[in-house]
Image (spheres, grey):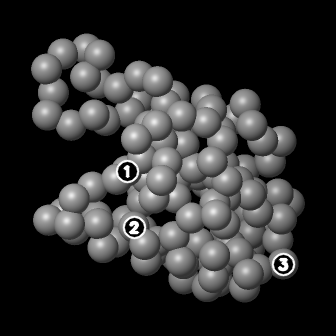
Amino acid sequence: MKFVHLINPVKVKEDRDLFYAQPVTFETFKIAKNFSDISIEQFSVQFEEDREIIPNHITIIDNLTRSIKDLGDYQFKLPFFKDILDLCYENTNSEYIIYSDSDIALMPNFYSSINALIE
């Protein structure tokens, strides 16, 4: 069984909880992958300005080019989920796509548990 785990990180200022949560998430991605003997690709899809925060152990597959700001005057530059999934789908041959928000830390047995549920 082969998985791809997709994340959409965003560079934020220190006054946001996400500033502290994302590095934890990034580290737990590494730990969970090392803990597992399952084939796992870990991908990031983001806007160009967010690339610099993504650690080397997560593969950057592409930048997003559209956001809800293209549709109107919105406060945040939020992506379209379809664009995130499309970029992932185009760059993997994995059987399963897992998506996590960038503030979700993984337990070490995360991938083993997903695999057991699918089996």
Q: 10 Å neighbourhood of mark 2: few (<14), some, or many (≥20)?
A: many
Label 3 residue SS: loop
Of residues 112 and 93, the one nearer the viewer is: 93
Q: Residue visible at 46% across and 37% down?
A: 48
**Contact (Cβ within 8 Å) of mark 2 with mark 1:** yes
Rendered location of residue 88, percent (x, y): 65, 39
Report whether residue 8 is seen. no
Three-letter amino acid code of the residue under disc 2: Gln
- Label 1, residues with CA under 10 Å away: few <14, some 14-19, many ≥20: many
Residue 22 image offset from top left, x and y in percent: 39, 67
The residue tagged 1 is 10
Residue found at x 66% / y 42%: 61
Whether residue 8 sits left or right of residue 119 in the image: it is left
Quick one: label 3, few (<14), some, or many (20+) residues within 10 Å? few
- In the displayed structure, does residue 79 sit left or right of residue 115? left
- Pick whichever of labels 2 and 1 is earlier in the sequence: 1
Q: Which residue position is annotated with label 3?
A: 37
The percent position of residue 7, horizontal first and vertical second, equals 52, 53
SS state under label 1: loop
Instruction: Using the numbered discs, state the Cα–Cα distance from disc 3 to disc 2 in whole angstroms.
Output: 24 Å
Q: Residue 22 shows which numbered tag?
A: 2
Q: Distance between the residues labelled 3 and 1?
A: 29 Å
Residue found 74% across the figure and 58% down from its top: 41
> Looking at the picture, does residue 28 appear above or below residue 49?
below
